[in-house]
Image (cartoon, rainbow, N blue to C red):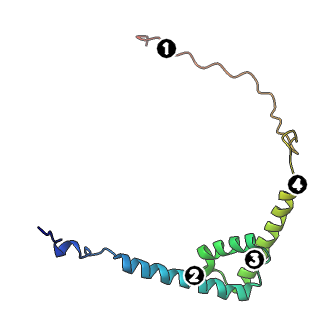
Amino acid sequence: MSETVPEKHNQPSPGSITRRAFARGAAIAAAASTVTLTACDSACGPPKNPEADAMFHAVLRQHGKLLNDEQKKELRSQIDGTVEGLQKLRTYTLENWDEPAAVLHLPAAASPAPAPAKPAKGAR
């Protein structure tokens, strides 16, 4: 006994997307983002640090179409400076007994005001 699947189950429902169409769209989107990023690399200068480059491309993926070439160059230099500072901070080793540079001291609070008494049940 051979069972066959009805043809209506093989057809996508109206308004849905097939796996093949989704894969095609994903491939086109990936190729387009690569083209955009490589075009910006030539205008924005060579990457100095892989971490800074990753941050730069993350910002470009979200906001790249809103930025002109001058703004992209400025963004690259700001990210490079930030990552450079982060690398200097990471080289400084801390031990468990090292205290923070600044300690928060709060003024002594006055005794809290007593809560208002709740009326007894049945009292008006």
Q: Mark 1 and mark 3: span between their CA atoms? A: 66 Å
Q: Which amino acid does label 4 sit on?
A: Tyr
Left or right for 30, reference 69: left
Q: Earlier in the sequence, mark 4 or mark 2?
A: 2
Q: Nearer the viewer, residue 111 or 44?
A: 44
State which quadrant residue 83 falls in.
bottom right
State which quadrant residue 55 falls in.
bottom right
Which residue position is annotated with label 1? 119
Q: Which amino acid does label 1 sit on?
A: Pro
Q: Which dot marks residue 9?
A: none
Q: Nearer the viewer, residue 20 or 103?
A: 20
Which residue position is annotated with label 4? 92
Q: Is residue 31 above or below residue 49?
A: below
Q: Is residue 107 above or below residue 10?
A: above
- The quadrant in which the C terminus is found is top left
**Crowd rating for badge 4 (residues with CA inside 10 Å; few <14, some 14–19, many 20+):** few
| Residue at figure coordinates x 75%, y 81% from the top left | 73
